[in-house]
């Protein structure tokens, strides 16, 4: 190579990986599941389960664009616990109340 000649270099293509965003449904599902014991445990527990399942389906349909499958799974598990708590806690309370007042 002589001095003064042009050097042609073709750049190697760099793969482009678009940044994944966390599914908003997964975030909402986890937020609802965490807040469920504070109010409307049974209703919010079911809502968390439904949102968590919808988020997981959305993430599986677009894995290159969305992430948050673990958040959605956590929301489903906590939502199941919340729903059971919403069923069992009132039953235990009323049975205890009835026993204390001689109704049972």
Image: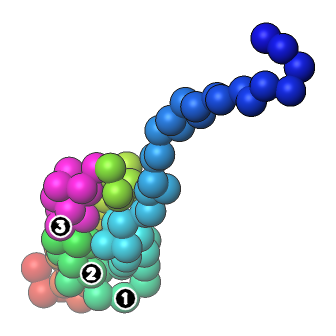
Q: Which residue is mark 2?
A: 44
User: Could one spot residue 47 in this view of the protein?
Assistant: yes
Disc 1 crowd rating (10 Å Cα; few below 14, some 14-19, many 20+) is few
Q: Nearer the viewer, mark 1 or mark 2?
A: 2
Taking 67 as reference, is 98 left or right? left
Q: Pick whichever of labels 3 and 2 is earlier in the sequence.
A: 2
Q: Nearer the viewer, mark 3 or mark 2?
A: 3
Q: Nearer the viewer, mark 3 or mark 1?
A: 3
Q: Pick whichever of labels 3 and 1 is earlier in the sequence.
A: 1
- Residue nearest the viewer, comparing 83 with 71: 71
Q: Which residue is mark 3?
A: 54
Q: Which residue is mark 1?
A: 39
Residue 17 percent coordinates (x, y): 46, 46
- Residue nearest the viewer, comparing 25 with 12: 12
Taking 99 as reference, is 65 left or right? right
> Element under label 2?
helix
- Residue nearest the viewer, comparing 80 with 86: 80
Q: Is 57 located above or below residue 3 in the figure? A: below
Q: Quadrant of the N terminus?
A: top right
Residue at 59 percent across and 33 percent down: it is 11
Magenta segment boundaries in residue numbering: 53-63
Residue at 28 percent across and 49 percent down: it is 63
Q: Is 23 located above or below residue 46 in the figure? A: above
Residue 58 percent coordinates (x, y): 20, 62
């Amino acid at each position: 190579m002589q001095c003064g000649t042009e050097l042609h270099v073709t750049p190697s293509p760099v793969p482009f990986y678009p940044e994944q965003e966390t599914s908003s449904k997964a975030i909402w599902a986890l937020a609802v599941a965490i807040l469920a014991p504070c109010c409307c445990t049974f209703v919010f527990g079911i809502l968390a389960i439904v949102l968590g399942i919808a988020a997981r389906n959305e993430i599986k349909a677009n894995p290159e664009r969305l992430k948050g499958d673990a958040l959605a799974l956590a929301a489903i598990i906590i939502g199941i616990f919340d729903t059971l708590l919403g069923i069992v806690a009132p039953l235990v309370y009323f049975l205890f109340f009835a026993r204390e007042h001689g109704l049972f």
